[in-house]
Amino acid sequence: MLDARERLIVALDVPSLREAEALVARLGDTAVFYKIGYQLGFAGGLGLAADLIASGKQVFLDFKLHDIGNTVQKGVESVAKLGATFLTVHAYPQTMKAAVAGREGSKLRILGVTVLTSYDDADLAAAGYDMSVPELAAARAEQARDIGIDGLVCSAEEVRRLRDIAGPGMVLVTPGIRPAGSAAGDQKRIVTPARAIESGADYLVVGRPVVEARDPKAAAEAIVSEIEHATGNRRGS
Ligand code: C5P
């Protein structure tokens, strides 16, 4: 059973190393798991990832890989050597197979991105898909499970449905989290931390509600205690 603190992944969605380091320092022991994406990753964030890992924190590299199999496999091998805990890939079968091969023998866990949480059915139609968000997410989850992917990134609305497909062994990681009263931003499918945990999400990814808070540590602490209270009402626990 995970500690409530371990379930909160703070997205370091800031433009510079200086700001990221300041945020990490401010959060102190409140945050033990950080997500680094494009913005910081391409601004020196991989060095910070190595430093965070060396200091005992866990790191989620949200690079949503998708390329030819050989390129994905070699890239994943490098991420595994870095000591990261999670890495995202888009949930296309060829990409997922290559990622699973690349993380072999390491502690890295691969997360498949089924459908981005900023997408709705109209966005999928514009991208050429003749499927609704739930249909595409379910189809990709089945493929991920069959290929041996370790977990999925999904909206909290999808957690119950995906848990039935994924089974208890896969981790479900949920962005689009908004504590009551915070702005949705560009997220189209949002829920509170408590709802997400009660639905069966294992980890919550939270960016702006912590990063843009006047007091990020207090905001993160409030989310951790909401997670703690909700854990008892968790589906399946
Ligand atoms: O600021 P906010 O809490 O919306 O940040 C959510 C984080 O989760 C962002 O870093 C975003 O890129 C990421 N994410 C997402 N939807 C996915 C995968 C990752 O919002 N499907």
Image (tube, rainbow, N blue to C red):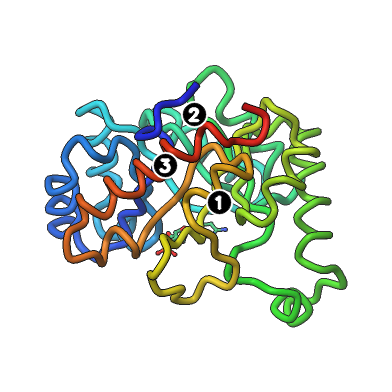
Frontmost of labels 1 and 2 is 1
User: Residue at the spot x=68%, y=41% of the render?
Assistant: 96
Q: Which residue is mark 3?
A: 60
Q: How far is disc 1 from disc 2 in space, using C-alphas?
A: 28 Å
Q: Do the residues bearing badges 1 and 2 touch, measured as CB atoms within 8 Å?
A: no
The image shows residue 99 at horizontal and vertical percentages of: 62, 37
Say what amino acid the circle numbered 2 marks: Leu
Q: Secondary structure at mark 3?
A: strand
Numbered circle sitting on residue 108: 2
Mark 1: is the Cβ under 8 angstroms from ligand 1?
Answer: no
Q: Is residue 65 left or right of residue 96?
A: left
Residue 136 pos. (x, y %)? 80, 59
Distance in Å between CA atoms under marks 1 and 3: 23 Å
Which SS class for mark 1? helix
State the residue position of label 1. Answer: 195
List x then y, in percent, for residue 66. Answer: 61, 54
First in sequence: mark 1 or mark 2? 2
Amino acid on which disc 3 is placed? Phe
Label 2 near ligand 1 (CB < 8 Å): no
Side of 125 relative to 38 (left or right): right
Q: Residue furthest right?
A: 130
Indicate the quadrant where residue 5 lies: top left
